[in-house]
Amino acid sequence: MTLFDFDRVPFSRHQRFTTLSMVQDQDGEPHCYLRYVAGGDERPGLGRLCKLEFLSKDGSVLVPDFTLSPHRLDVALFSNSQKQGDVSFCIGEGELIHIKGQGVTLKFALEGSRYDYAFQHPDGGQCIVAASENLRLTPFTTVGNAVVEGNWCRDHADNVSLTFCGTRFEGGIILHRRLCPEVAKRSFEEVQTRAQHAFTKWHSKKDQSEAGQLATYLLWANTVPAEGALTHPSVYMSKNHMINIWSWDNAFSAIGLAGIDSDLAFSQFAAIFDWQDDSGLLPDFVHDAGASFAFTKPPVHGWAILHILEAYRGCFSSEQLGYLRGKMENQLSYWLTHTRASEQELPSYFHGNDSGWDNASFFDHGGPVIGPDLPTFLCLTANCIARLFRKAEEPLMANKYDQISSDLKDLMIKRLWNGKCFLFRKPAHPELALPDSSLAQFMPLLLGSDLPREIADKLLERFNAQGFLTQWGPATENPRSKYYEADGYWRGPIWAPTTLLIFDGLCRQGEVWLAHEVANRFMRTCEASGMSENFDALTGTGLRDKAFAWTSAVYLRCQDALSKAQLTSG
């Protein structure tokens, strides 16, 4: 089985919204669609523009066989097992999809909305308007013909389509909001060569495994341009379904990018931090059309920045670090000021979505909830701020944030440590015992030597004894728990971000062999099942979205860490 499976992995290009992917139609059947993945994932159509139909000369439907690579998508077309022709796609400069084909007809059937229409420009050029998507499609050909059709009906057109035809055809479609931009009409072969060179130049890696190349491709191809509300180029989680940048996903994408493109790594933080509220609150997510503050996400950014600075020295400039420090000061202030009643209490999550572990078992009775992961992340945020103040030669401010971290750690131990494990509690109902079977209980391992040794030892013993680590990686819910669900989102499946957090926590506790075992198991899972959103903890099967950015980022980070460890030991 190839990991570059077009049934699972969309075809796109770095800093483009234009995408080809397999999508279920209204009858639940998978079809190839041209999409424009702007506007966020709340829209039912998810940017769906046109269904692609591959037809023989007599109009019968042909069976496609897709071959995906980072720079092009090829389609061999069959009828009764006999090849009839082929079509190929690549993406050029701007939002421009190039097409060539022979022996067949290629039809783009517009999905359809209330005010769609097609028209002819005074210069003879044709244009389709996908009104609900606020998008125009302008075709061109250098070989063969492109025919636009539609049935006019009072104030719109039904059954709008664009067909490329001829014994051979070559051309493309320009996707644009306003007037059609002037674009160079390069040959298909030149465009695909440029795209291949752009990908290779971006990652500069040699002799990649298929999994490594897929992970690299997804970080590259899932990036959309700075446009509208996106102040920086942003890595969307996927160009399948999850077409936003979320406020903790961004930190893991940044870690995966840090060794490839440091400016793009910084952009992942800035795309979110630029939207920070005056209170320090971060949005749940951002896309080109706006941001949502209905939820927020856990403050993992201080940990992530520390991780990057330790693994990739010199990754960020002094100016970038100054920006990040100021944003983290505000972020820390939000959590310490607005999510607890007093300084004697721990900060809390109001909703599971705020924690990132959306439906975890410790939210079984709703929120607000206090637990060990949030104060751990805030301690690390304070540590990161202190480190950056020391770098700026401001020791008094550094000492201030070191003290904040120490006080918060002590409060976490006082309120939540019961001698065996860290607990989760509802501030409004402190007598209510919440489930203690989530992987989140082990996040204090990230504190390294700041966590008392006897507590660290008991956490490590508990992690090893209770079966959280399966042959595929660390389960987010103990498989022995009554709350465990094989496809339960945060109630069982293996996730990339929590895997990296556990890996780093084990490393910081000196459990390097076990940390490397965790990384190896996760990598083997990805190599078997691709870069899925999450994985069945007992079978390793990929679940949900099958082309996820933070899975790719964590795979590359694990690969890099293990490679460096081998070089050191060798």
Image (spheres, rainbow, N blue to C red):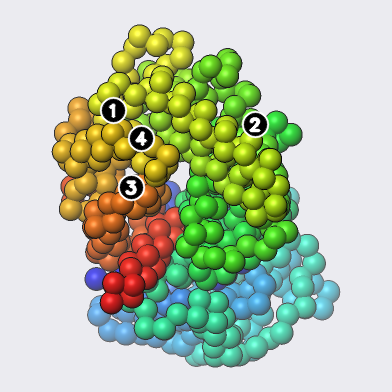
In the rendered view of the protein, which quadrant contains the C terminus? bottom left
Q: Residues within 10 Å of mark 2 (few under 14, many from 20)?
A: some
Secondary element at image label 1:
loop
Q: Amino acid at mark 2?
A: Ser
Q: Amino acid at mark 1?
A: Cys
| Label located before the other in sequence (4 or 1) | 1
Count of numbered labels shown in the rendering: 4
Kindly state the secondary structure of the residue where label 4 is placed: loop
- Is residue 481 at all visible to an observer of this figure? yes
Q: Which residue does the image show at 53% across and 16% down from the upper left? A: 344
Residue on which disc 2 sits: 333
Residue count near mark 4 (Cα–Cα under 10 Å), binned few <14, some 14–19, many ≥20? few
Examine the rendered structure and indicate whether residue 316 appears above or below residue 276.
below
- Circle number at residue 509: 3
Instruction: Locate residue 569, reporting x and y percent.
Output: 29, 72
Q: Secondary structure at mark 2?
A: helix
